[in-house]
Amino acid sequence: MIRTAVRTLVRRSFSSIERGDVDKAMAPFAEDFRFTFPGRHSFAAQGVGKREFKAWLTRLAHLQPKFRVSDVFVKGPPWNQRIAFRLSDEIRAPDGFVYRNELVEYAHARWGRIRSLEVFLDTQAVAELDAHLTSAGEAPPAA
């Protein structure tokens, strides 16, 4: 039952981001939340807090990404859950440039609140998206 609830929550969160509803996507995150997104580009984030993550997520939502969540795994009791899932994302720039990436995200949650989230993905693809958006003058404001 908990696994089903977590899977539903993960999918709904990404649907909220697609719709630009960042506040709804942020609902399950703890106040002391920490986020890590690797790479050498303007999307990189190392252990940022909830406020910075909301700005980061707002920037991402501005790009109107499309997500496909698969393989959601939940392990542990409600006071110490580990959650992992695979995710595909796609962003289409107005000039026809298409960004695609495959990710694995790993989260730690306690009592229904996400405490940390680490993203594992092709950072070179993100750097190429970042460079394209900047050169095309389409980059949303940095977080």
Image (cartoon, rainbow, N blue to C red):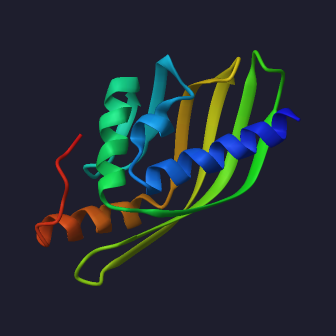
The residue at the point 60 percent across, 58 percent down is: 87
The residue at the point 75 percent across, 49 percent down is: 72
Q: Is residue 11 left or right of residue 67?
A: right
Q: Is residue 120 left or right of residue 139?
A: right
Residue 49 visible (yes or no): no
Which quadrant of the figure has residue 131?
bottom left
Which quadrant of the figure has residue 115?
top right
Give above or below for 12 relative to 121. above
The residue at the point 64 percent across, 50 percent down is: 11
68 or 73, which lies in front? 68
Measured as percent of width and height from the top left, residue 122 is found at: 48, 61
Which quadrant of the figure has residue 53?
top left
135 or 51, which lies in front? 51
Classify the position of the C terminus by image quarter. Answer: top left
Give above or below for 134 relative to 2. below
The residue at the point 46 percent across, 32 percent down is: 35
Number of numbered callouts drawn: 0
Q: Is residue 44 left or right of residue 27?
A: left
Give above or below for 2 relative to 141. above
Measured as percent of width and height from the top left, residue 85 is found at: 68, 49
75 or 140, which lies in front? 140
Please identify the residue farthest to the right as the structure is shown. 1
Q: Is residue 51 left or right of residue 10?
A: left
Measured as percent of width and height from the top left, residue 100 is found at: 46, 71
Classify the position of the N terminus by image quarter. Answer: top right
Residue 141 visible (yes or no): yes
Measured as percent of width and height from the top left, residue 14 is found at: 54, 51
